[in-house]
Amino acid sequence: MAFDNLLAERTTRMGASVIREILKVVAKPGMVSLAGGIPAPESFPLEIIQELTEIVVAKYASGAFQYGPTEGFWPLREALADYLENRAITASAGEILIASGSQGVLDAVGKVLIDKGDLVAVEAPTYLGALQAFTPYEPEYVRMDTDELGLIPGSLESVLAGGKVKFIYLVPTFQNPTGRTIPLERRREIADIIKKYNALLIEDDPYGALRYRGHDIAPVKVLAPDHVVYISTLSKVFAPGLRIGFCHAPEQIRKWLVIVKQGIDLHTSTFNQALASEYIAGGFLERHLPKIIDLYRPKQEAMLSALDTYFPPNFTWSRPEGGMFLWVEGPQGFDMEELYWKAIERNVAFVPGKYFYTSPQEGIETMRLNYTRADEETIDNSIRILSEVIQS
């Protein structure tokens, strides 16, 4: 049977994740991956999971395995309200929605807000997964300029002044792909601008808890609460396979996100939500998070040190205070995709940066590096190999 004529027109705007396709190459034996944004398996609290499971079964019995409300498992929503309070976000349990990973929220946002041809403002570069979530709904992307401190407020204002933007998408803290964090003063400017233009901001914050140095910075949600949909996840601080994301949105948007989720999956796994609720409420997350940070901090330091030691002087890179990524920029016109295939021959993989831009003409000389999966010795050796390939 021929199926091509059955496919919806929107499939022409959909494609496999470039990064996930790249990761297929990473599966080759002996390959070192500095590519995917995947947590280290040793960061998972495996010694806690069995205890959490016993607590959940004893406490909730069959209720942990039953259908649940679309909005989310109430004990988890209560736990997340306290969790967000530590991020200076005031939210009642009833205002928090649970999703199957933060990606589930991004897709729901696209379905609720985007009509064909709507303008969506994104950073250059931006998170590829957000583009994959939004693109099937046929928006037109408007790029916003960035520098080493993230989004430039003046660029945001120019974009908002220039046309009717449906919403802005932003990863302000330890951004994927660059690792950059927007400083507080700039966040205040951004908050003032979106309030001035009565604009909606989608603030994606999956990495904020992974801080290795410096001090936490208030989310934009704190500075402009009525204008921000705040999205986060437990994937980086618990276990990504459990698929626990969540959001806090203005009421008029929140009710539509619930309706959309009812049509997608009814609700996120009740058992997984119960595990997450006990992980947070029982103090396990508070005790385990320092272990994750102690695991990742030396890995990041090893990568930064190796770049300082081996990379040519005409390359530059970000120096984040946390997160999972570094962003490297080569001289203008340097082809990082060509470098990628040569590096693969030496068993080292990374992600060419051009995939994080909405314009195919941008980012050819950039790359994203991840340090969470490899040990410090492997990171040092891999950066040395990349430098050799660059110089060759």
Image: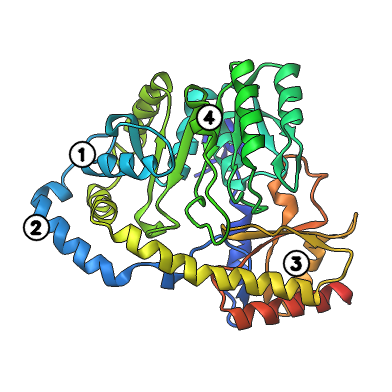
Answer with mark 1 or mark 4, whichever residue precedes in sequence: 1
From the viewer's perspective, is 305 left or right of 255?
A: right
Answer with mark 1 or mark 2, whichever residue precedes in sequence: 2
From the viewer's perspective, is 236 left or right of 326?
A: left
Q: Look at the image and name its color scheme.
A: rainbow
Against 278, is 307 above or below? below
Q: How many angstroms separate mark 1 from mark 2 (CA)?
A: 18 Å
Task: Indicate the amino acid at tag 3.
Answer: Tyr
What residue appears at the point 30 percent right and 31 percent down from the top-left corner? 92
Label 3 or label 4, whichever lies nearer to me, is 4
Answer with mark 3 or mark 1, whichever residue precedes in sequence: 1
Answer with mark 2 or mark 3, whichever residue precedes in sequence: 2
The x, y position of residue 213, in whole percent, is 57, 60
What residue appears at the point 38 percent right and 60 percent down from the top-left corner? 239
Badge number at residue 68: 1
Mark 3 crowd level (few <14, some 14–19, many ≥20, 10 Å Cα): many
* Mark 4, secondary structure of its residue: helix
Q: How many angstroms separate mark 1 from mark 4 (CA)?
A: 33 Å
Disc 3 target residue: 340
The x, y position of residue 387, in whole percent, is 80, 75
Q: Can residue 8 be seen? A: no
Q: Can residue 9 be seen? A: yes
Task: Indicate the amino acid at tag 2.
Answer: Ala
**Are circles 3 and 1 on residues that touch, CB within 8 Å?**
no
Badge number at residue 223: 4
Mark 2 crowd level (few <14, some 14–19, many ≥20, 10 Å Cα): few
From the viewer's perspective, is 222 left or right of 273?
A: right
* Mark 1, secondary structure of its residue: loop
Task: Indicate the amino acid at tag 1.
Answer: Gly
Q: How many angstroms separate mark 2 from mark 4 (CA)?
A: 41 Å
From the viewer's perspective, is 242 left or right of 192?
A: left
Disc 2 target residue: 58
